[in-house]
Each structure stands twice: as C-alpha cells, then as structure tokens.
Image (cartoon, grey):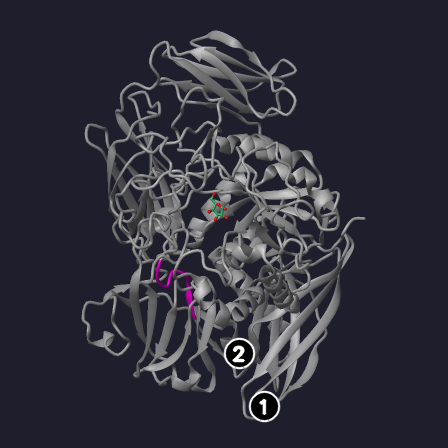
Amino acid sequence: MAARRTSCCHLLKNKAMNRLPVINKLIFLLTVLIVTASCTSKTDVATPTTRKVNFNTNWQFYLKNNATEDSIGSHTKWRTLNLPHDYSIEQEFDENSLAGIGGGALNGGMGWYKKTFSVKAEDSLSITSIMFDGVYQESKVFINGHFLGKRPNGYISFEYDLTPYLKYGENTTNEILVKVDNSKQPNSRWYSGSGIYRNVWLKTTNKLHVNTWGTFITTPMVTKDSAQIKMDITISNSNTTAQQINVQTNIYFKDKKITHFKDENLKVDAQGEQLLTQQITLENPKLWSVENPELYTAVTNIYINNTLVDQYTTPFGVRSFTFDLDKGFILNGEQVKIKGVCMHHDLGPLGAAINTRAIERQLEILKEMGVNGIRTSHNPPAPELLTLCDEMGFIVMDEAYDMWEKPKTEFDYANYWEAWHKRDLEDLILRDRNHPSVFIWSIGNEIPEQWNERGAEIGHELAAIVKAIDSTRPITAAMNPPIHTADPSVTIQFEETADQPNALAGSGALDLIGYNYAHQTYVKHQINFPNTPFIATETTSALETRGYYEFPSDSTKIWPVRWDLVFTEGNDDNTVSAFDQTRAPWGSLHETTWKIIKKHDFLSGFYIWTGFDYIGEPTPYVWPSRSSYFGIVDLAGFPKDVYYMYQSEWTDKDVLHILPHWNWKEGQIIDVWAYYNHADEVELFVNGKSMGVQSKKDDDLHVMWRIPYEAGTLKAISRKDGKKVLEKIVKTADKPAKLQLSADRSSIIADGNDLSFITVEITDIDNVLHPTANNEIYFSVKGPGEIVGVASGDPTNHESFKGTQHRALNGKCLVIIQSTDKAGQIEVTAKAEGLQENTISIKTTNL
Ligand code: GAL
C-alpha cells in the first residue's frame, strides 16, 4: 500500500521582496499602499511598511586573534568595508592552514566588526532589533558595551533586541561590536568562509507587531479549482497595557489584490502574545510548479485605533505534493522526478560572502541544464537562495546538520550540540517553512550516531522538533547504507541481513528513507522498506577537470582506490579526465546513476554531488589542489562536458554536444563522444570525411567513435528521420593570439551589489577557442565598478580569488565586476603577454 502524504503550500517571509527587480518592488509596494488606503478609511502611516532596512554598509573590520572585547577598542587598524564579508577568502592559500586542504587551505582567525549608527528620537517608542542572516562562526554581539548574546552555529539566522540599550537622537551614536571566532580549526569538512558573510538588517517595529517568522501559511486542500489557505499569525505586544487590534490580511497575485481574510478584532495582553488562525478558500489557484513557480503574497496589516501600526509580508505558493511508494514524487497530481544537485554555500571566487546575483547565476546555469532540485548541503542556506528557488522553481531539501553529538572534525558543531541543537533546528524550520520551494527537511548528513540506538533516539527527538513547527513536509536524513562496498554484486539489505543495521533508518523517525550513494541497493528499496518512500539524498561523486581528457575514455577509474587509502595514482598536474570515467570509490559515474534513477518510478529522484565545484575537499588529490572536482560545473561557472548529458536528458532543447577538443598529435587515437537528443543518429566527419553514423542503443546516454586524429575540422550532425536536427563543429586551434570577452549581462544596476560575470576566452587569430591555453591574464577596470573575483576552474591555482590577475584553464577565465552606487560606463580590459588585449563595456544604471 502506498504511503501518501498530502501537503502543503507555503511561503516565506518579507525577504522575497529583496529579490524582485527594484521597479517591480516599487510598483508592488505602491500598489499595496494604494489598495490598503483605498479599501479602508483608516489612517495609514508609511513607517510600518519599512520594517527592515539593510544594515550592511560602513562597518569597520579588524582581523585579530587573541583579542578580547575589552582590548579590541584600543586597536587602530580597523578597515572600512561593506557586508556581506568573508575574511578567509581574502587570505593567501596556505598548505599548512589549520582548516586543512578539506577546508580549502584558507585560514580563519578571529574577526572583529563594529559599526556606529544613530537612531531617530521618535523610534524610542518602537522596538529596534538587529538581524543577522548568518555569521561564521561563534559570534558574540555587543551594543554600547552591553553583551547581547552569542551564536555558535555559523549558518543560522538570529536576531537581538537592541531597544533597552540604544541611545536615541540624530546626534547620538550607538556602537555595535561583533566578535567572530573562527580560529579553532578544523571545524568543517569543506570551506566555510569566515565573518559576517550574509546580510544584516536593522528592524524597527511598533511595540505591537507580528513576530519574526511569525506567520505560517499552509494549504490543507489543493485542487485545480480551489485551495484552502490557512494562515497562522503570531502577534506580540510589548506594551505595558493590553491592546485592542484589528488584523487584516490581503492576498495579492503579482501586483493585484485578489482576496482577503476576514478582518479580525483581537485583544493582545500586555507583554503578551496572541496566535490568530484564519482560513479562506482561493478559487482557481495558480499552482506553484517547477515550470511555473507562481507566487502569492499575503500582506498583513495591524491597526490600533484605525492607525496602521505594523505590516508584515508573507510570500507563499499553493501546491500539493506527496511521496508515493510506487510512483515517487507527485507534485500537483503529476509525477515529477527530482533531478537535483547538492550545493555547498560558497560562491567560488566570491567565497562565502553572499551575493544574490551570484546565487541567481548559479541557479540559472543549473536550470539551463535541466536541474529541478537543490539540496542545501549540509547546513541552513542563505534566505536569498530559498527566495530564488521559490521564484525559479526548484525542489529544495533543506538540511540542518552535518553532525550531531559526535564530531567529524575537532572543533565542529558537535561541541555546541547539547546547548544549541534544539534552538537552531527550531529557528531553521520557523524561518524557512513558508517557502514553497522547500519540500523536504533533512535532519542530518551521514551522522555517525546513525549506527546505534543513540542515533534512533536523536532522530526521534529532532523529528518531533520539526513536526511541532511544520507537519506538512516529510523528514529525512542523508544516511549511509549499512555496508560500504564498491562491489556492485554485493546485495545490501538494510534491516534483515546487514552486519550493522542502520538504527536511524529503522527507527521510524523518518518519513522518507534517504541515503547517500550505494546506488546498487536502490532496486531493493521496496523490499527493505516496504512502507517508506525513498529519496537518493546524495549520489555520484564523479570527478572531472573541465577541458582535460584521457584515453581510452571507456575505462572506469576509481580515484582514490579506497576512501581510507592514500591516493598514489593520478596525474602529476592533479587533473582528472572530463570524460565521465572517474569516480570516488563510494560513488558512481554520472551515467550509471541517472540510468537507475530514470528507470524506476518508485525512486522519487536524487541530489547529485555536486552541481558546482566548491572550495575545499579536493578528492582525489591533496595539496596543491584546494577545491573540488565533483562539480558538473566548475568553480568559475563553466560547465564540464557531462553538463550536456544531463541537458540532453532533462530539457526540451535540442542538444548535440561533442567532446573532446580537436588539438591532438597527428595520428593519435582519439575517442569522440556525442551527447544528443531529439535525433535517431549522429554522423561524425573529420575534414569532410565521414567517420560513421552512431545511434544510442538501449539505455545508452552517449555515442562514441574511436578515430585517428587529423588536424582540421571535427563536425557532427544529428538527424531525425533523415533530416538534420543540429550540427556541431570543433576546429583545431592555431596558437593563442587574442583575448575575447563576453559578459553575462552588459547592463547592471548601480547599487553597489550587482554583478557582471565576464568570460575571457583565449582564441587563435581566427577566433577558435584554444583548448589548452593557460596564459596569465591581467585585468583592469575604469569607471564605476570594481573587480571582486577572478577564477578559472583550476583546482590547483593558488592565486587569490580577490586579485586582479589569474591564469586561464584550458582557454577560459572569469572576472567578476561589481557596480558601485554611481551610474555610468565600466570598461573592463583583459591583457596577456603576447596576446591581443580586449576591452568590454558594462553599463550601470540607477533604475
Ligand atoms: C559524502 C559527504 C559529502 C562529501 C562527499 C564527497 O559522503 O556527504 O559531504 O564529502 O561525500 O564525495
């Protein structure tokens, strides 16, 4: 019998607004105000609509170990900067870094931030708080010398009430001091970054207000014709007298008010809290889906004596879903295979410092490949990531922890587990439960306790914490299968025959059985777990260097040979072939994995390790490598070839991609692969001569020719019913001659945040990409912009990501330009010795 779980809907919080194009935001806010004003005769005030302002600019920073909050003030070497900020990415790569190669060979340390600000006299009647989206890690915050609190978890969002300690008046200043302690290393298995690396907000509300994360919208019933929308609103009153309030929530679709909850009059006790639960039926709902991620917004207005005192915005989506034992993931009644990727939080050359456009670019590149799911491995993500996933249509597995009580590295979160795990998990669920893109909560990744009863106990405890706040989504954990094996002939049974049963898997605490790797066991899932659906929480761990190829391409390499053995094979230059032929011993090749997931309906989907390369964990190598090889896309955002295998399988686009490049030794035997779709066959030509026609047989995902190399032109033609679908040409490049620049966006906003990602290609004189060129490229900028990152996707490069020069990898390099707050024209020039330089213009506009 199928286990079914019908859910839900959601939506997030007012942060969704942060991502709408500015003009849409203005139109929306204006509409909200006009509609609010026109549908009531009550007196509106503007202030409640600007509850939260960005508090990122003009901080002072000082990197100083062994200082104390008392001694730090006497130091004079403070540097002024804007947040978000990552002080690890600014440092030099260091083979002996305490963070280790796994941590990206970048150091942490103790970082100090301070900011002075004044608060208007009239705000003394309000509540003022500071909100941090994430600080890595062990932060302590002080206001005017008063200790507000500490937060060890580096990924969690938190808030402190400043009101009792503020000095008011335009001519009076307050000082916030933040201590960040990332000096105890190692504390992470990947690059964490250091500092106030996410956004900071200053929030001002009336003493009567909706709590932070204080709304929860669910959809208990959804059909194509109508949906029930249920909304919980928690309202606080920090006045010394009870307040009689009037609550009105309007629902908007795009910028149009479409319906509203019934007006409610309530009394909220002095220093009290009140929960209001309301329900309405929405006719003809626009359902949130991966293809059409339709979003609604609920705007809650609270009035006291006809005056608007608070306004809270809750974006949400309407969708139903279930994980079916036989049919996998069902969204709005339709079967949807989850084609997801795991992502770490770093943004390549930008480090951990979040930038909304940089996250959006990653998601655009993944969407273009056909990805429809993101796993926030292995920690709470930036709120902006979830907002983007809501808007772009991704199925998110939101993950809480990489460890529980037992540590994985000496100074990790296990040290704080006992005191903090409940609070951190509650805050994560409260913060993220309104996002329609969030479908699965993961309570942990490869948790050591999973093998014993303690794992089952903690699993139950965490599941209860989650369910108490949100019972509409399934809970999983990314477990390990009970026996590690690289031998596909070994049958792994979970509960019955395993030497070491997985206590967490068998505990009944999980709604979805999720485990990492062991793809050979997937077919047995329905036997091992007849009552619990399955999600492949993490798969693959195949390895590639972009643009580097080894022959023969059809032999599989297991690198390293075993997870606990030192890797002695491999290449002197720490490269890995970009043919899908190399995998970690616990992993599987891309094609092998997708073939299994594709074949069985009951496998709801998978999250591939990983979508993008990330800093740290450079398996199979160690130093000089400092970043991963697992990505389908490299650290600079350039796709590796296997990207097109997925694109040919997962998108409606016509795809024909051939590899490798066409610069080899005369006569060398070369394997040429083609990924294609929407065609019956592909014919390959070398300098006009046919090398034969190939077709995919059975479950093949590519075709291959083995041919002798001859310089010139490699051409592939895909045909359907004898008619050409696509043609692809790869030419032999002559020696490197020019630099060619192209920008992902040639016009950006002059807001000091927006980015243009500029790709540099090294070509020959005829504009053919030189596939092995690795020239050192020097960048310069004129006008209102600055270089904020450089990268090539080479895991062994030790030049700073924050510099102005970088060595290209296999013909390509990236420079990231950030706007300032001045509009104008930015000129970016790339130069390299012996090559024709080039300049590109980026416009920045105020909008
Ligand atoms: C997994 C782990 C990931 C990453 C990956 C590399 O076991 O969950 O965090 O380490 O291996 O293959």
Q: CA distance from mark 2 to mark 1?
A: 23 Å
In the picture of the structure, the residue carrying the numbered disc 2 is: 45
Question: Secondary structure of the magenta portion, mostly?
Answer: loop
* In the rendered image, the vertical position of residue 487 relative to residue 147, given as above or below: above
* In the rendered image, the vertical position of residue 708 relative to residue 476, given as above or below: above
Q: Which residues are magenta?
A: 194-201
In the picture of the structure, the residue carrying the numbered disc 1 is: 270
Residue 464, given in percent of the width and then of the height, sits at: 64, 67
Label 2: few (<14), some (14–19) or many (≥20) C-alpha neighbours in 10 Å: few
Residue type pointed to by label 1: Ala
Q: Nearer the viewer, residue 602 or 641?
A: 602
Residue type pointed to by label 2: Val
* In the rendered image, the vertical position of residue 373 relative to residue 834, given as above or below: below
Q: Is residue 586 visible?
A: yes
Among the 4 quarters of the image, the one containing residue 820: bottom left
Label 1: few (<14), some (14–19) or many (≥20) C-alpha neighbours in 10 Å: some
Label 2 or label 1, whichever lies nearer to me, is 1
Point out the residue furthest to the top here: 689
Q: Residue visible at 70% across and 77% down? A: 263
Q: Residue visible at 35% across and 22% down? A: 768
